[in-house]
Amino acid sequence: MRGLMFIFLMVASQARGVTCDDIIFDDHAFTVCKVDAAQEDLRLFHSDSNGDVMGSFLSLQAELGEKDVLFAMNAGMFYADRAPVGLYKEGGETYSALVTSAGPGNFGMLPNGVLCLTSQSAHVYETIQYGALAPACRDATQSGPMLVIDGQLHPRLLPDGQSKYIRNGVGTSPDGRFAYFAISNEVVNFHTFGRLFRDHLALPNALYFDGKVSRLYMPEIQRADAGFRVGALIAVIDEPH
């Protein structure tokens, strides 16, 4: 019986729509997590029920109570008060507006983009395209720069770029079913990080979330990155059984 139960648990775990793998790409270490957006409850989170910014995986789990956080990652840039930079939408409500103008920093290095979530899909859109299409997103977060745009690297991602950080971002499959979240486990430049999505994951569109503050939470691989509080979080949650 114990052996049968073990086999059942193994099959159930493999059938889940969230998996993470440690990989080596271009001699650099990354962790890539694949989420089936049609199967899993993938959502954005920013503030708790009291209106306070959560900003950490522990606070997110505490806010959700009996629901389990299966996966989580920081999901976009933020101001000093941890308010989102650019568009932020959660649960159908828009909290900050789309920004289409160029500006300072990585966010303003156009083109930037938007991750759009529905109950069944995840899509990365370039910002101007997002504004023109006006997709019906339940949740959305704007960040920048885009890493991959219609299969091409952002033109300002240079092979010899000297800015190197721990970085994280997201790419989506053409049909919107799968979202791929990646974090570098060592410092890399933008060019290497962009090529991870284009060349290794073969994704048509990918968006940079942030660098230096990048975090990943995935209990199944016993990973729970810590550090000072961030802004928006993206997570897969599971109802208690």
Image: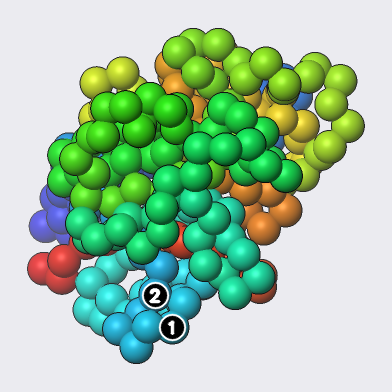
- Residue 52, position as x, y percentages in the image: 43, 83
Question: Label 1 neighbourhood size at 10 Å, few (<14), some (14-19), many (20+)?
Answer: few
Q: Specify whether residue 2 is in view.
A: yes
Q: Residue at x 34, y 88 (%)?
A: 50
Residue pictured at 56% horizontal, 69% vertical = 82
Counting residues from the start of the chain, the first of labels 1 and 2 encountered is: 2
Horizontal and vertical percent position of residue 51: 37, 83
Q: How many marks?
A: 2
The secondary element bearing badge 1 is classed as loop
> Vertical placement of 84 versus 38: above or below?
below
Q: Are marks 1 and 2 in contact (CB under 8 Å)?
A: yes
What amino acid is at disc 2? Ser
Residue occupied by mark 2: 47
Q: CA distance from mark 1 to mark 2?
A: 5 Å
In the shown orientation, is residue 77 left or right of residue 17? right
Residue 175 picture quarter: top left
Identify which residue is drawn at 16% across, 55% down. 5
Can residue 20 be spotted in the picture? no
- Residue 197 percent across, percent down from the top left: 53, 23
Toward which corner of the image does residue 23 lie, by quadrant?
top right
- Residue found at x 27% / y 27%: 133
- Amino acid, disc 1: Asp
Identify the residue at the far front of this view. Answer: 101
Does 19 sit left or right of 108 as displayed? left
The coloring applied to the image is: rainbow
Q: Secondary structure at mark 2?
A: loop
Q: Which mark is residue 52?
A: 1
| Towards the viewer: 6 or 213 | 213
Query: Which residue is nearer to you in this view: 55 or 8?
Result: 55
Nearer to us in this view, 70 or 202? 202
